[in-house]
Image (spheres, coloured by chain):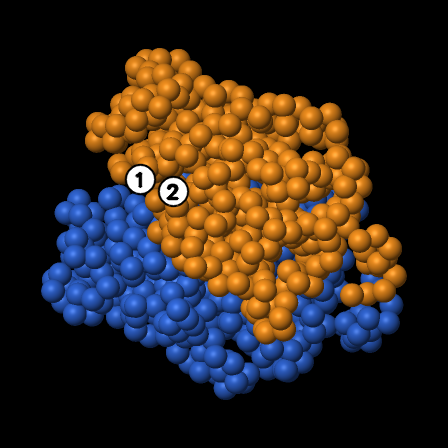
Chain colours: A orange, B blue
Amino acid sequence: MVTGDPATTYLTRHRPDVAVVGGGPIGWAVAWRCATRGMRVVVHDPAPGSGASHVAAGMLAPVAEAYFGERELTGLLTESAGRWPGFAAALTEATGTDIGYRTEGTLMVGLTADDLAEARRLWAYQQGLGLPVTPLRPSQLREREPALAPRVRGGALAATDHQVDPRRLVPALRLAAEQAGAVLVAEPVRRLSDITAGVTVVAAGCGAAALTGLPVRPVKGQVLRLRAPDGGPPGFRHVIRGYADGAHVYLVPRDSGEVVVGATVEERSDLDISAGAVLRLLRAAVDLLPEIAEYDLVETLAGLRPGTPDNAPILGPLPGHPDVIIAAGHHRHGIVLTPVTADLITELIIGGGSADPLLAPFRPDRFADLPDVVGAAAAGSTSQPATEG
Amino acid sequence: MVTGDPATTYLTRHRPDVAVVGGGPIGWAVAWRCATRGMRVVVHDPAPGSGASHVAAGMLAPVAEAYFGERELTGLLTESAGRWPGFAAALTEATGTDIGYRTEGTLMVGLTADDLAEARRLWAYQQGLGLPVTPLRPSQLREREPALAPRVRGGALAATDHQVDPRRLVPALRLAAEQAGAVLVAEPVRRLSDITAGVTVVAAGCGAAALTGLPVRPVKGQVLRLRAPDGGPPGFRHVIRGYADGAHVYLVPRDSGEVVVGATVEERSDLDISAGAVLRLLRAAVDLLPEIAEYDLVETLAGLRPGTPDNAPILGPLPGHPDVIIAAGHHRHGIVLTPVTADLITELIIGGGSADPLLAPFRPDRFADLPDVVGAAAAGSTSQPATEG
């Protein structure tokens, strides 16, 4: 480390109460919550906000993303989405920043009869969980969104599925955390044993695997960013999620004119943009909303979601290391899960390890036979460098 | 101008014989030819090689591009394509540079029966002009290019339609010209009357309009650059040009693994990349060559071709200004027309205005009632700044 650097000086003078590894939305939100509770907090990240959140669309969609076989995850998503209005309001009040939080709701649509049949099965499952899914006739769909293609056969409204702009959210969270006293150390963490702090929170996304031995794997997603022509806003207001000839696509409109179109889900870890993925996303988007063809294509980008074996996040103490708390593996759900993660992890730290029952299904010890990467590294053996998210 | 700059010093000491406005392929080729004939040459361009040639695919395709109603242009394209082997050899010998000149030929294909019917009418026209178009059965097509989609209904070979890499060509031409003594002045030219030289050659692409009053208009083209996966070469060797469900597309494979996919032809002058254009190009490309879906999309770019009212270039003296020679308006054909343009313009300068009969159909004076932009500017009135190509 460079002597004289303010963060280093801070670390030398004050052993932090909490060290957060990873300056993405989860990391900064934990840092913000902990700092406002009076803890001394440092955040370690060589490039804050440059991970999965930079690529993410920012859908807050516990209803539309309630999939078969993920009931416990759906519960956590719903809980966190319920905390989003207060979280957004508090963040905007603390920072004066517009984070692009919008509440027009989400339209789920099917292009063909086959697409609609597939979608309806999922909507029935979601309604069976008591989630607010309102089927709409084509005429009702078009009343809400006249820009939808006339071919669209049917849809449903998830009125409580909202959105936020992750590229505004993360800087706002960082600002809030720093205003509350958190300090950034813009350097990579190679081993957790290098950190001196009361508690270490691992919010390093895919980087958590190398740091902890937990089964977090990169899941590639390719995403497009378009811009409505002539500097205007997009010609639709809802988040649109749909099936179009078997392809799944979402479109997230922003006040700025930006539309995020995503996303592939690929079990690979490169960041290449493939012609086929761009073709499939654009084709599905234009099939559902023909005006998209007139939009500018301004960005093609791939990111790596931190996936886990059961698609659910890993939240809680690392087995054998009660002072290491994991807040990682959020997969497709990092943005929606930010409030509940920050709240529960902060309470866990304050409570000295006494956990909210909400955390029970997501504890790290559900993955048996972990290698003790932290202990081995502390004992002096080598470990792989970790990339933080 | 900055005093002490070598180019400025050169200009102060030696009045050039030839000033070329525009450092694209035409400008540098003229400069090279003139410099090797002993003339003192300067080339004016603030950003050489950054115009249409940076976007161009580099097809040398007088046969495939022989369209109805363009017989005189087809003659010039054929003449220039015939000069390309010698031109490429001389350039490679002069510079030691690989310019990506490839002679595998061009396959013209039709995806559907409708596409094939449309293509066959054009091939019949081309054969009627005596051009070498060889119809191929689907089995013959697939023998030549096994990567073609099984759906492709038929095709034809234009064995003499070759390719070159414009991004290698222009630096090689510049190197050859500079080795022969040509000097770059990397500043924009606002008025031709600011130039002191025996002869001024306007090779400024779209910029020729503002400098001369000639009817050169920007015609937008959007082009994609892909890369074959895993660092290998593309899975096909010929240039592929085809119709796919009514959409026209070409694919140009390079040894480096690059594939250029183009191009839109749009009567507009912005450089935005539109979602619809990318979708149509990718869909047509993947329809013809399915493996393209696996390629990386590495660049989306738009350029402006210098179009003219009859789609043919403007070559020869500017009416009323025998010391101003135009070599502009090459539209889609700048790369293939580079050798013949350089030869004819150089001979015109050496011959003191005595023109090769080949130039007759392309003289600037075919456009009547030109405003005298050059004379007016010299007389002190203001003019718009020109962007060189």
Whole-percent x, y for residue A155 in the image: 33, 22
Q: In which quarter of the image is residue B288?
A: bottom left
Report the disc number at residue A281.
2
* A117 or A327, nearer to the observer: A327
Q: Where is residue B199 in the image (x, y as percent from the top left)?
A: 66, 66
User: Which of A285/A335 is in front?
Assistant: A335
Q: What residue type is labelled 1?
A: Ala
Tag 1 secondary structure: strand
Residue A247 — which label? 1
Q: Nearer the viewer, mark 1 or mark 2?
A: 1
Name which residue lies at 30% across and 15% down: A137
Q: From the viewer's side, name the closer residue of B121 and B68.
A: B121
**Which residue type carries mark 2?**
Leu
The residue carrying pointer 2 sits among few (fewer than 14), some (14 to 19) or many (20 or more) residues within 10 Å by Cα, namely: many
Circle 2 — which element? Answer: helix
CB-based contact (under 8 Å), mark 1 and mark 2? yes
Query: How far is the residue under mark 1 from the one under mark 2?
Result: 8 Å
Q: Which residue is drawn at 59% across and 33% down?
A: A339
Earlier along the polypeptide chain: callout 1 or callout 2?
A: 1
Q: Position of residue A128 (x, y in %)?
A: 31, 22
Chain of the residue displaying label 2: A
